[in-house]
Amino acid sequence: MLTVIGKATSINVRKVLWTCTELGLPLVREDWRDGHAALNPNRMVPVLVDDGFVLWESNTICRYLCEQHGGAALLPLDAQARARVSQWMDWQATELNTAWRYAFMALVRGSPAHRDPALIEAGVAGWNRHVGLLDAHLATHGPWVAGEDFSLADIVLGLSVNRWLMTPMARPDYPHLAAWYARLGERPGFAAWCGNGVP
């Protein structure tokens, strides 16, 4: 039995939960407790425990689950196809996450440390620009992020775009992104882990 540690409202935990749904994997989810600190020196979620094997970092966990539990449909065996999936997963974790962090902390979390109007405006602009890059990519390389087939890249970016859509701010209309997001709504696990009212 797999154990996933972390609140189900965490965007990174939901990556793992959605992946498990797509793979049909039963799991037990536990909230983080102080006793879990020995499992991850960063004291961050999610943490996966698979028959005594402990792993952290959400995108790494998602890739591991596919490799360990027959998920070639989500993470292809072909080296080039797999690299395309990993490329967009890494972009989500680095470029896109960096772009939205200040604006999200200000506009959704209400963080006292994120109240500079100029930085909020710059954060919104940067966030919109990055999502625009994804829209332009989908226009010519869709229907899914890594090409013809749904993959882990769509899961991690679907959650990021859900956060973008739910943040109270001005957003451009991105038609290719909107069509892709509508397709995501047909996937197992979308309602539970992405289109569930949690940014």
Image: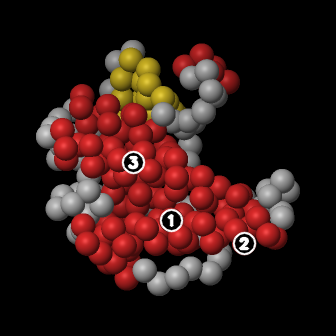
- Of residue 95 and residue 170, the one placed in the foreground of this image is 95
| In-image side of 121 versus 154 (left or right) | right
Q: Does 174 appear above or below 101?
A: below
Q: Position of residue 161 (x, y in %)?
A: 47, 65
Kind of element beneath mark 3: helix
Q: Earlier in the sequence, mark 3 or mark 2?
A: 3
Q: Position of residue 182 (x, y in %)?
A: 33, 74
Q: Which mark is residue 121?
A: 2
Pointer 3 local density, CA inside 10 Å: few below 14, some 14–19, many at least 20: many
Amino acid type shown at disc 2: Glu
Give the residue drawn at x 47%, y 84%.
173
Q: Quadrant of the N terminus?
A: top left
Pointer 1 local density, CA inside 10 Å: few below 14, some 14–19, many at least 20: some
| In-image side of 117 versus 157 (left or right) | right
| In-image side of 5 versus 148 (left or right) | right
> CB under 8 Å between callouts 2 and 1?
no
Kind of element beneath mark 2: helix
Q: Earlier in the sequence, mark 1 or mark 3?
A: 3
Q: Which mark is residue 89?
A: 3
Give the residue drawn at x 56%, y 43%.
7
Amino acid type shown at disc 1: His
- Of residue 10 and residue 117, the one placed in the foreground of this image is 117
Q: Does 51 appear above or below 111?
A: above
Colour pattern: secondary structure
Question: Disc 3 versus disc 2: distance between alpha carbons?
Answer: 26 Å
Classify residue 32 by image quadrant: top right
Q: Is residue 93 visible?
A: yes
Question: Disc 2 versus disc 1: distance between alpha carbons?
Answer: 14 Å
Q: Position of residue 4 (x, y in %)?
A: 45, 34
Give the residue drawn at x 29%, y 75%.
139
Q: Which residue has dot 1 on it?
A: 130
